[in-house]
Structures are given as C-alpha cells and as structure tokens.
Image (cartoon, coloured by chain):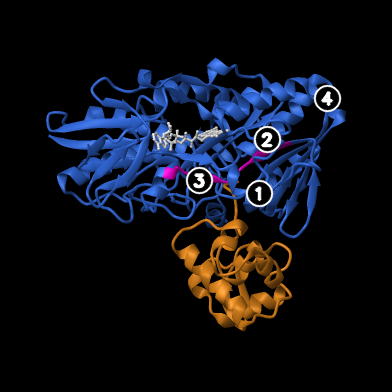
C-alpha cells in the first residue's frame, strides 16, 4: 500500500515497513522515526547505515549479532531504539521486519 | 580423472551424491563424499522423540545405506577447506584435491553463544531438541515430569525448520492433555520476534490457535543469559521469564570448519548466490542446504528443491554453459498442530504462506495454512518420503522445484478478478 512519509509517497506493507529499501533516505528515516517517537541523531544514522549494509549483503540480523558488530553494543542499541530495538531500527532503516517463515 | 568432492552426507549431501552419480560421466569424474559420523539422523523426527511418538531407532539409519555404490565415502572429520588451492584437509591430515566442491555441512546448535545456557542446569532442566542427545534427554525428562512452567524459547533467527518450536508447543499441549496433567502445566512461548506468527496472512489466520491451546506468548525477548541458580532467562532489557523446564533453540551456526577456512559470515554460513547456489567467492565451489546464507528456510524440503536446481547447474558448469537462476526459495513444510492434525505451508522468497489447496488447485487433498487430519498423515508420511524418495534423489510426483501459484489464495489474483 502507499503511504506518505516526509511528504513523499512510498510503498509500505501493513505494518509500515518500506517494501523497497531504495525508496529510503534520511528524510524518510526521520519521518518514520517520528512515528516511533524517536528523534534521530548522527549516532542513530551510523547504526541505520550498518543495518542497511547487512541487509544488502543478505545477512539475517539479530540483536546479539548487532551487539557483536563493533558498531554499537547491545545496551546502547536499546538506548537508541527503546523496546524492541531490532524491529524499530529495521523499520526506520527501511529494511524488512525480522521475521520467520510463517 | 577429475574430482568432485561433497562435504557432508546429511540430507543435502546424500541427495547430491545420488543425483550426480546417475547424471555425471563417471568415466571422467570421481565422486567422493565425506562425513564424520556413521549414523544419518532424520532430524524432523527429533520433534516427535520427546513425546514418545517415535522411538530412538525411528530417527536414524546407517549413512552408507543411502549412498550410491559408485561414490567413494570417507568417514572422517573435515578440518579445513583451502579454496585458493582447491584442497580439503581432513582431521587426520589426509589431503583431498578437488576440481569441483559442494559444501553441505549443514548447521548446528551453538548453546555456548549465550551466557549460562550450557550451565549447571543443561540437560537437567534446560534442554534443546535439535540434536539426538537433546531430544532423547528431553524425552526422559518429560516421562517423569509432574508439571510447572514450561518455557519454549528461541534464541535468535535464523534457525533450521523455523516452525519446529511452534510445533513443539502444540505437541506439548496435546501430550500433557493426554497425560491428564495439562492443568498443572503453563506453556510459554518466548521469541525474539514480535509474535509466534510473523507473516501477515499467517498471523491473521492462525493467531487464534495459541489462545485456544492456552499457549502464552512472550514476544520481543532477546536473551542475554540463562540464570541457572534462580531458573530464569533474562533479556538484555532486564525482562525475566522463570522456568521449571526450559526447552530452548540455541543459536544455529554453520560448522566450525567454515569459520576456520575463512569462508563464512559471522554465523559461519557460506555466502551463496540465492538463485544459482554457486558460492559468492569461488566459482568452482557450490553450497547447498543449511550451510548456505541464502534467505530461504533451512529445511529438508528446501534442500530437496535446491538439489534439483544444483544438479542441473553442476552439469552446466562442467559443460561451460551459463548457470540457471532457477532456485526461487521454495519450501514446503508440514506444521504439526497437535490432536492428530497438521497444516501445510508452501512458499518461496517472494510469496508468503497463504491458504489454498495442494498439490492440485481446487482439489487438495492437502490444505494450505489450515489444520486437518490429512495433513497430519502427510507429516508422519514424510519420514517414508524422506528415506525412500528424497534421499534417493527421486522427485515427489506433482511437486516441482519451483513454487506453483495455482491453488493458492493470493491477494494479487483476487485483485485481478474483481
Ligand atoms: C527438530 C528439527 C525438525 C525438523 N523438521 C523438519 C521438517 O519437518 N521438514 C523439513 O523439511 N526439514 C526439517 N528439519 C530440517 C532438516 O533436517 C534440515 O534442514 C536438513 O537436514 C538440512 O540438510 P543438510 O544436508 O544441509 O544438513 P545436515 O542434514 O545436518 O547434514 C550435514 C552433515 O555434514 C556433516 N558435517 C558437518 N561438519 C562436518 C565436519 N567438519 N566434518 C565431517 N562432517 C561434517 C554432519 O555430520 C552432517 O551429517 C528439521 C530439523 C530439526 C532440527
């Protein structure tokens, strides 16, 4: 379905995750973050860029793995994206929600 | 003579040995397959062993009974792969040279990744069921268990057979009911994801099952440690879930040999082209089954569909023809729901599980994303299919390597007809 984020039409799924990660930019990220109640700083963007890079190389993400990445430790990850950091950060990064097959 | 070497003789390696020994010219190619253990486990059976549905001898066979005679079988541990010089070194120092390599070393549990998981309660009140030992020990525990809080827990994705923990919860509900102690057992399902069902159609169609069966969901739980002393699991944001019996799915990782060879990602899965199954870094190395990093489910049925595509691509590679990008992520899995019923799901990289009929549109007899008894017999019959058809490299009638859209209630199709 179509949604308007940062005054731009983008394709999202039922849960508001971008369908095409290439429609993402910093403005879109800020728009989604606002819906999640988060104001983005440079530090947030470092993490978001890392997540996008991992997604592009096909890696499945988990909180433990993000914590081992050297980009951010788990405590800070929770501080930046409180309550469910991986699903929130993924949405703001314009990548799919971590999911199972069913 | 040229050498084709297959590492791992589990589901995927065994299928490839059977396919290729029939299709390659054995006048110019030697086929060798290596595995460390004499027993080939039927891993889907590990779900049933704890509940005394299967006996121990139902879940394994002699590995060599399923390998063709015209393939050399070496039973040794693999130490390291040296892809730059086309060699594999075994644990006893033997060097195997190859022209073409197929990696099929699967994935294993790595409980050591979480603090305390393999602590003092391991195999006392903390169990896995993804290994033969874990599944058997859990059976012994359940036989004498009088009830309490049973916590079924997933550490992190990806895991092989992603529906197995949910099936375990459904079967546990049924098992305790039959034993007459269901009222003494609380079942919790603890997941790092935002629910037990994470795909939109499945969650809307199946969410009710959990409530009906009295299974409590604890979502968004990223485990930091197992507290053995106080018998609870603790998350990174300090949530706690107490257990009397913890059934956990530890982190799943590719084999250590992949890490040692510098060929894997941080979970030791080998970067692989998701449509051709050629390794991303070495053109004469192909990867199949749970060992790859492709975003398909890690399941025996997936390995079966991959094997058909990979067989073609190996033959094409040998002939110098371009590889076919034919693997679409197709998976076809039965989901046991307890009380003699099961569901069937059929999906691929781009199509989520949806309702419908399978394999014949409008007819069935299997039902997609819906419980019935026929599906349950399908699930139990899968063991026969596994040993007698999949492992021998036969196709299952009417089920193609690529997912079929016919028979599925897909939203796009609905839109087109209105
Ligand atoms: C509880 C459970 C339930 C499941 N249920 C289903 C189901 O219902 N349907 C379904 O389709 N799938 C199911 N699966 C998944 C299925 O079993 C796997 O996806 C499948 O076995 C993968 O095949 P594979 O060949 O890639 O790996 P495996 O079959 O695990 O084979 C890997 C082989 O490599 C060998 N190996 C690894 N490292 C080395 C080394 N260093 N040296 C020598 N040998 C080595 C191992 O000994 C092993 O034999 C289930 C799995 C589990 C655990």
Above/below status of B271 relative to A18 = above
Ligand 1 within 8 Å, label 1 CB: no
Residue B248 in magenta?
A: yes
First of labels 3, 2 by sequence position: 2
The stretch of residues the image draws in magenta is: B246-256
Q: Earlier in the sequence, mark 2 or mark 1?
A: 1
Question: What kind of element bears circle 4?
Answer: loop
Marks 3/2 in contact by CB < 8 Å: the verdict is no
Q: Can you identify the residue that label 1 sits on?
A: B115
Chain label for disc 1: B
Which chain is blue in the picture? B
Q: Is mark 2 within 8 Å of ligand 1?
A: no
Q: Position of residue B211 (x, y in %)?
A: 79, 41
Tell me the element at label 3. Answer: strand
- Of B38 and A55, which appears nearest the observer? B38
Q: Residues within 10 Å of mark 2 (few under 14, many from 20)?
A: some
Residue B122 - label: 2
User: Disc 3 designates what residue?
Assistant: B253
Chain identifier of the residue bearing label 2 in the image? B
Q: Secondary structure at mark 2?
A: loop
Quote the CA–CA distance across marks 3 and 4: 34 Å
Decide which of tag 3 and tag 4 comes sooner along the chain.
Answer: 4
Residue ID at (61%, 30%): B134
**Residue B290 % position (x, y):** 45, 42
């Amino acid at each position: 379905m179509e949604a308007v984020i940062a005054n731009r039409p983008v394709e999202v799924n039922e849960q508001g995750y971008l369908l095409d990660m290439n429609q993402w930019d910093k403005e879109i990220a800020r728009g989604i973050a606002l819906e999640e109640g988060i104001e983005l700083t440079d530090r947030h963007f470092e993490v978001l860029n890392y997540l996008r890079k991992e997604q592009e190389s096909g890696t499945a993400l988990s909180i433990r793995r993000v914590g081992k990445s050297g980009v951010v430790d788990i405590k800070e990850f929770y501080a930046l994206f409180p309550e469910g950091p991986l699903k929130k950060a993924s949405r703001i990064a314009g990548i799919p929600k971590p999911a199972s097959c069913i | 003579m040229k050498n084709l070497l297959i590492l791992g003789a589990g589901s995927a390696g065994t299928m490839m040995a059977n396919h290729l020994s029939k299709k390659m010219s054995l006048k110019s190619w030697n086929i060798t397959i290596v595995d460390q253990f004499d027993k080939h486990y039927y891993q889907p059976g590990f779900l049933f062993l704890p509940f005394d549905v299967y006996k121990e001898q139902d879940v394994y066979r002699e590995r060599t009974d399923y390998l063709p005679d015209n393939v050399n079988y070496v039973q040794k541990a693999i130490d390291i792969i040296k892809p730059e010089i086309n060699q594999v070194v075994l644990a006893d120092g033997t060097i195997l040279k190859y022209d073409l390599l197929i990696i099929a070393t699967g994935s294993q549990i790595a409980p050591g990744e979480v603090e305390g998981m393999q602590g003092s309660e391991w195999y006392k009140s903390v169990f896995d069921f993804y290994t033969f030992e874990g599944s058997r020990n859990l059976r012994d525990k359940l036989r004498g268990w009088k009830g309490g809080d049973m916590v079924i827990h997933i550490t992190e994705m990806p895991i092989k057979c992603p529906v197995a923990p949910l099936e375990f919860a459904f079967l546990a509900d049924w098992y305790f009911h039959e034993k007459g102690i269901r009222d003494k057992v609380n079942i919790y399902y603890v997941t790092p994801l935002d629910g037990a069902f994470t795909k939109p159609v499945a969650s809307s169609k199946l969410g009710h099952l959990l409530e009906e069966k009295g299974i409590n969901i604890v979502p968004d739980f990223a485990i930091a440690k197992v507290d053995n002393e106080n018998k609870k699991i603790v998350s990174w944001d300090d949530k706690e879930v107490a257990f009397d019996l913890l059934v956990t799915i530890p982190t799943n990782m590719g084999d250590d040999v992949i890490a040692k060879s510098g060929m894997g990602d941080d979970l030791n899965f080998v970067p692989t082209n998701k449509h051709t199954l050629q390794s991303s870094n070495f053109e004469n190395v192909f990867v199949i089954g749970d060992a790859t990093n492709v975003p398909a489910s890690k399941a025996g049925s997936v390995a079966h569909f991959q094997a058909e595509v990979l067989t073609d691509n190996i033959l094409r590679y040998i002939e110098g023809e371009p590889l076919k990008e034919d693997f679409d992520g197709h998976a076809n899995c039965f989901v046991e729901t307890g009380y003699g019923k099961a569901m069937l799901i059929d999906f691929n990289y781009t199509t989520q599980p949806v309702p419908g009929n399978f394999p014949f549109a409008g007819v069935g007899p299997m039902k997609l994303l819906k419980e019935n008894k026929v599906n349950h017999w399908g699930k139990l019959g899968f063991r026969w299919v596994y040993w007698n058809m999949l492992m021998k490299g036969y196709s299952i009638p009417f089920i193609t390597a690529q997912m079929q859209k016919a028979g599925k209630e897909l939203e796009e199709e609905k839109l087109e007809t209105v």
